[in-house]
Image (cartoon, grey):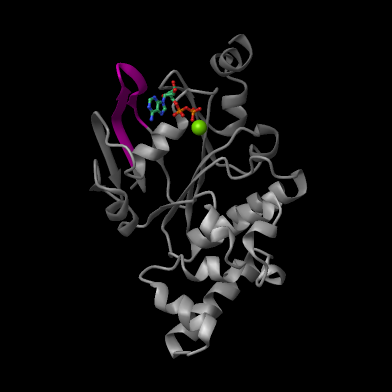
């Protein structure tokens, strides 16, 4: 069974068909990539899957369950988590704090406990898990640094770390290496491949095809709200329709 499946998924903005009957299937434990020119509907697709937009038609199934039109918090409970750019208030927190507050059901009290050191066993375990996650992402040396002091790439890794703290089944990420230096961009995709081996599925929108193509398992190409090509990376890159939307304009 596919972990994610959309059937004829559509989203309209004032008559504009941002998504026009999109059928996308994602296999469990894969890195599935969505590419396409600017304005082709990639972000709209992700936002519709994750519940931030309600589709105008079509269905979304996750692990065989119909999740169409559920609000983001319900979709999150099914195990789909989206990475988010770190908002300003979180940038004042340290890297470790950023991971701790991302865990499910963690309230402000844990952060207070961190600050005033009234430790409970549960909180110790949470900190340990956050540290293990930072070690896995190879940013544990940055644990006490405020997020605003990080480089763009380091911040992207913190965002992945926050997603991981929720124990997701599927991570959805929009341009995870935008503006990241090549070495760190490769490092981020190496981590994604490691996480895939541990059982996590990735749905990724990314522009930097030179970097990502060697890591991903399957590619969908969108143009004008529709899927115009799909397949293994090498097949898609040789598809004349894909070459045309990228070069033909
Ligand atoms: P991509 O991520 O592939 O660059 P988007 O999904 O952001 O494309 O946008 C697809 C189309 O939908 C574009 O024409 C864009 O202008 C339009 N669009 C996206 N979001 C909105 C919105 N919230 N309101 C109106 N139009 C939107
Ligand atoms: Mg976009």
Q: Nearer the viewer, residue 61 or 224?
A: 224
Q: Is residue 21 magenta?
A: yes
Q: Is residue 108 left or right of residue 213?
A: left
Q: Which residues are magenta?
A: 5-23
Q: Nearer the viewer, residue 207 or 62?
A: 207
Quadrant hosting ligand 1: top left
Residue at the image point whose x is 31% and y is 27% from the top: 11
Q: Is residue 229 left or right of residue 216?
A: left
Residue at the image point whose x is 52% and y is 86% from the top: 116
Residue at the image point whose x is 55% and y is 41% from the top: 217
Instruction: Tell me where residue 245 appears, x and y as whole percent.
Output: 56, 15
Res 2 visible? no
Instruction: Tell me where residue 75 appears, x and y as whole percent.
Output: 31, 52
Q: Is residue 96 left or right of residue 108?
A: right
Quadrant showing the C terminus: top right
Task: Determine the residue located farthest toward the top in the rendered image.
Answer: 248
Q: Name the dominant secondary structure of the magenta segment.
A: strand
Q: State which quadrant residue 159 falls in.
A: bottom right
Above or below 145: residue 169: above
Residue at the image point whose x is 62% and y is 56% from the top: 157
Instruction: Tell me where residue 33 appears, x and y as whole percent.
Output: 52, 38
């Amino acid at each position: 069974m596919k972990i994610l499946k959309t059937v004829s998924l559509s989203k309209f903005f004032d008559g504009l068909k941002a998504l026009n009957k999109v059928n996308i299937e994602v296999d469990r434990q894969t890195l599935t990539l969505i590419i396409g020119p600017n304005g082709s509907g990639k972000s709209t697709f992700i936002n519709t899957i994750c519940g931030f937009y309600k589709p105008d038609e079509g269905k979304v199934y996750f692990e065989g369950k119909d999740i169409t039109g559920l609000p983001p918090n319900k979709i999150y409970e099914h195990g789909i988590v989206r990475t988010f750019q770190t908002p300003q208030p979180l940038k004042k927190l340290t890297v470790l704090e950023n991971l701790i507050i991302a865990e499910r059901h963690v309230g402000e009290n844990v952060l207070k406990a961190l600050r005033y050191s009234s430790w409970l066993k549960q909180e110790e375990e949470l900190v340990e898990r956050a540290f293990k996650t930072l070690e896995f992402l190879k940013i544990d040396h940055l644990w006490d640094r405020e997020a605003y002091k990080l480089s763009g790439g380091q911040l992207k890794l913190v965002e992945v770390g926050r997603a991981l703290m929720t124990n997701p089944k599927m991570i959805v990420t929009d341009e995870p290496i935008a503006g990241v230096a090549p070495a760190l961009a490769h490092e981020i995709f190496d981590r994604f491949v490691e996480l895939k081996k541990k059982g996590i599925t990735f749905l990724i929108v990314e522009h930097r095809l030179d970097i990502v193509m060697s890591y991903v398992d399957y590619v969908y190409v969108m143009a004008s709200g529709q899927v115009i090509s799909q397949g293994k990376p090498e097949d898609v890159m040789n598809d004349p329709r894909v070459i045309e939307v990228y070069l033909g304009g």
